């Protein structure tokens, strides 16, 4: 079989496939009045550039290993072993610890160039650990224990921020019920996350988010830097797909328990609606959005798939004396999928900020518009 | 089909191949009299170590992604998507912006271990952008717009040299006419490049080049460091291949428009002649030199291909008050290609310097000899 | 054929295989009394995460290239070309310069999570160079000349520790006689290594080793940092495999010739015994331990292979006025190999230290216990 790259197999037990991903972005982030920030304006970057491999072996075992090189630096993405036995799957290594629907959906299948603001602000990332998943006919439950990201565990750095002293750990669980009601695929999910930062609490943490596009390092939304001892996170997920229409909505909370005693709870949420103008149905499988199959690909008598999406994306990083700012973001996207695996996206966003960092030390209310474009392939 | 690694295909539309390259170098760079530079003398390095993948997909789409690890650091090489429709090809991502013949010819197919001195001195490199190419029967025209190299766009670094503030862009075009006259393949080419460095002009730039071999960091040829606002480059190319003989010659100019007002124009040029002792013809295809097929490979009743090459390589980095020095380099190479894809090269160079940096702060005229050896495979 | 990933071939001359390796570790290193070292206690890391490729070509040529990403940094592993002609093999590029049996045995086939203490303490590592190996029926002899590791040769760093000034070189040789006596595979080996550090002698060197597990950066065993001009190393190897039982023992010496005149000789040694509870025979081939084939894999009516191992591991870094400390380590491991290529290991170690660095500046005698666990796949 071919999925961009050949999927090689022998009997039903051996399977092997090379994986790759390229995402090239350009964009523009408007500067608020009186800003002298040179990191705003036109932006351009290789957003993702990945090479990896995945496979299965006899006995129910499997693996996936993938690295990203997009900044001329290595970032391990997935690097795990799996063991599947009936409806149970055990996974050991670096993996996603059951975050939100938007985080778990592949970035080659999301409706916008960047995910919901809370996913970065709350530090959703892959971590090394072990998990177990039960996959039912219309529901899935998973849970696991984790330490930290491969980069944060690296022995190349000593001291409070280094991997050597990193003894943080977390317990994470997620459950989804995904019944089909008539012609509608429904999705109801929830997750909970508890993390003890251990000696990492001696290093400083800040919660923050970029103005939608990843090409700038400016963060209008950011808290000060704190010593955080532990974090409690939870999330609620809803989605529905019917014909060419889909909706999705999530809410996520993160309570940061600071060494100094404060316990602010930050909150993020989004709601989105999308429609395929060309008749496709958004892919959905086993509790997350999956690939969408193009009905009439370019070069086969069609023009590919066209999809429009609208999203409202809210993030509030102010609570219990901490002022990190709030955003009301209004996003629109147009996605052209000429053939399976390849996409060109055009995104527009208007971000309305409250108590945000206009420039160093000055908090204010202001609005910023952004526009971005991406060409991508994923195999 | 096999090209070092298997080239897998399904129907005529799906194609996939893993790519790899290893180049291991040793060499010696003589030190000028009175030099105490410990970076000279014997040198050794893994010159290139790459892994990548390329493929095509239905609808005319394709991709290539490759990274280099030769310094225990990642450097993205090609990372682009293509769309071909008839004689037109659109390319998006990191790619070569139509530089000179010597720069565009794969380093596994060049006549010497390192390319012409002007290619590094004028900062020829891959950049993120979009281009369009028209391929005629005996000519090709291409043009595109680009920002900067993946590493220079990386958000890991802030400030004037960092990717966050990088808003540089360039417009580049190249055209080649490559008729066949009797038994002779001819090549006449030209390219033009205009680059606005934008906020990069706040960081310092210096134009410089190593003494032929890459294993040393010493640069006898180097300008001081300047704030450069924009650059205008152009080049002329000629080549001919007839039987076992080939010649190639190029000239390249780079005008640097400094913030301080100076506008020096630097100049580089080379001429080379090469001959296959074993009867091969140097590969040429679509406006660049391509792989050469070995006639009698080692192990198939032959000894492989032997090629000798001579090159004169000139670079002048002094103009309009700027003194960067000049070189007249006389190079000779012997290349043994025992089987397709594998080469062993022996290179000798005599570099005659004028106004070059003998040691920190002291400019002088002197000569330096170099010898290098490379074992390489490319698939 | 399949070896985790498909091994593709065409005729008998072309062969190609993707390589990958994942090793995820957790563990605990006890702290000596009065220690406030936060790098001890619980540890966790991605120990290895590798992607690579290997192949052969017509004419007797071959190659292997592999990189490790386990710390979100690149580390080139093997990157070499080979030419085989009858019993001789020439190898050019980064490779292992004929170190000890334990170092040369793949980390996916060793009996413990980490190799003998002397292998790191004496800086066994891959280096760029050229070697030649003669493989007889029951013996092998190899020798070569090398410069340094790809990372140490990198031009990204200047100065005495940088690749630019690195002119170190070494000459290394190893020989093994591996007769079969009745039902017993025997192994008698020896190696010798001489290295001139050249200008590297201007940078400081320290000999040191972690407390068995790699997840901590703490080294109880460490010399001060010296300027070392040259090193002379030699080693003796013995091993035997009979049925499900194997034994192995090695001794290694390293004499460091310091610029200041001292010439301490450090010494390391280990002895191990291992047994397969499930009837397997430990793999052995051409002078090193090789893969072990699981007799009754999980999912094929068996539970996989279970192996128990005991090892005594000695290291003495004190001599001729240098005090680096000594260890007597007592190690036990249980390895479960459910199917070929996949392993889960549980390791325990008691390390008895003499003159070791309890905390900064304080040398003392003390004991430390460690426990570690690894899940791994290698293809």
Image: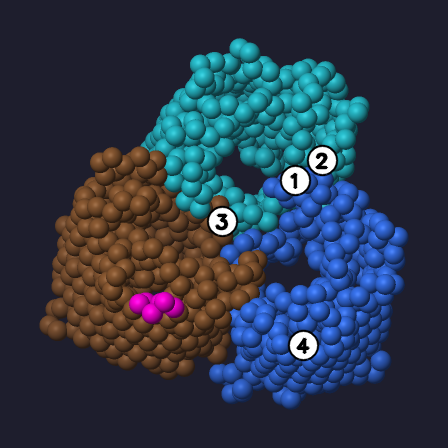
Chain colours: A cyan, B blue, C brown
Q: Which residue is the site of mark 4?
A: B111
Q: Residue C351 appears at what percent x and percent y?
A: 20, 47
The numbered dot on residue C224 is none
Alpha carbon distance from label 3 to label 2? 26 Å
Q: Position of residue C141 (x, y in %)?
A: 30, 78
Q: Which stretch is magenta?
A: C256-262
Q: Are marks 2 and 1 in contact (CB under 8 Å)?
A: yes
Determine whether the residue tagged by mark 4 lies in a helix, strand or loop. loop
> Badge 2, how many Cα within 10 Å: few under 14, some, many 20+?
many
The subunit carrying tag 1 is B
Kindly identify which chain the residue marked by label 2 belongs to. A
Camera-nearest label, 3 or 2: 2
Residue topped by disc 3: C73
> Which residue is nearer to you in this view: A139 or B4?
B4
- Viewer-side residue, B11 vs A345: A345
Left or right relative to A37: residue A267? left
For the point 61% across and 26% down, which residue is it?
A209
Q: Which residue is mark 1?
A: B158
């Amino acid at each position: 079989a071919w999925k961009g790259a050949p999927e090689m197999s022998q009997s039903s037990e051996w399977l092997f496939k090379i994986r790759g991903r390229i995402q090239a972005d350009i964009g523009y982030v408007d500067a608020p009045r009186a800003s002298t920030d040179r990191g705003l304006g036109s932006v351009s970057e290789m957003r993702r550039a990945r090479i990896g491999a995945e496979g299965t072996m006899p006995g129910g075992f499997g693996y996936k290993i993938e690295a990203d090189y997009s900044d001329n630096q290595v970032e391990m993405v997935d690097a795990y072993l799996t063991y599947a036995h009936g409806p149970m799957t055990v996974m050991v290594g670096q993996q996603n610890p059951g975050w939100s629907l938007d985080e778990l959906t592949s970035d080659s299948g999301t409706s916008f160039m960047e995910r919901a603001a809370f996913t970065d602000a709350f530090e959703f990332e892959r971590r090394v650990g072990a998990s177990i998943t039960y996959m039912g006919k219309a529901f899935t439950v998973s849970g696991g224990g984790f330490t930290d990201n491969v980069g944060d565990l690296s022995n190349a750095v000593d001291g409070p921020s280094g991997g050597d002293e990193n003894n943080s750990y977390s317990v994470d669980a997620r459950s989804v019920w995904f019944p089909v009601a008539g012609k509608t695929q429904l999705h109801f999910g929830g997750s909970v996350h508890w993390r003890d930062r251990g000696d990492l609490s001696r290093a400083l943490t800040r919660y923050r988010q970029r103005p939608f596009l990843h090409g700038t390092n400016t963060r209008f939304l950011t808290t000060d830097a704190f010593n955080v001892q532990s974090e409690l996170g939870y999330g609620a997920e809803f989605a529905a797909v019917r014909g060419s229409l889909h909706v999705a909505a999530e809410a996520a909370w993160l309570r940061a328990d600071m060494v100094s005693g404060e316990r602010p709870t930050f909150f993020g949420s989004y709601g989105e609606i999308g429609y395929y103008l060309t008749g496709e149905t958004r892919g959905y499988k086993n509790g997350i959005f999956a690939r969408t199959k193009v009905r009439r690909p370019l070069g086969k008598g069609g023009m590919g798939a066209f999809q429009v999406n609208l999203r409202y994306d809210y993030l509030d990083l102010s609570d219990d004396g901490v002022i990190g700012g709030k955003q009301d973001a209004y996003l629109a996207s147009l996605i052209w999928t000429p053939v399976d695996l390849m996409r060109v996206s055009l995104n527009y966003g208007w971000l309305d900020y409250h108590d945000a960092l206009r420039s160093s030390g000055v908090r204010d209310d202001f609005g910023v518009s952004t526009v971005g474009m991406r060409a991508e392939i994923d195999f």
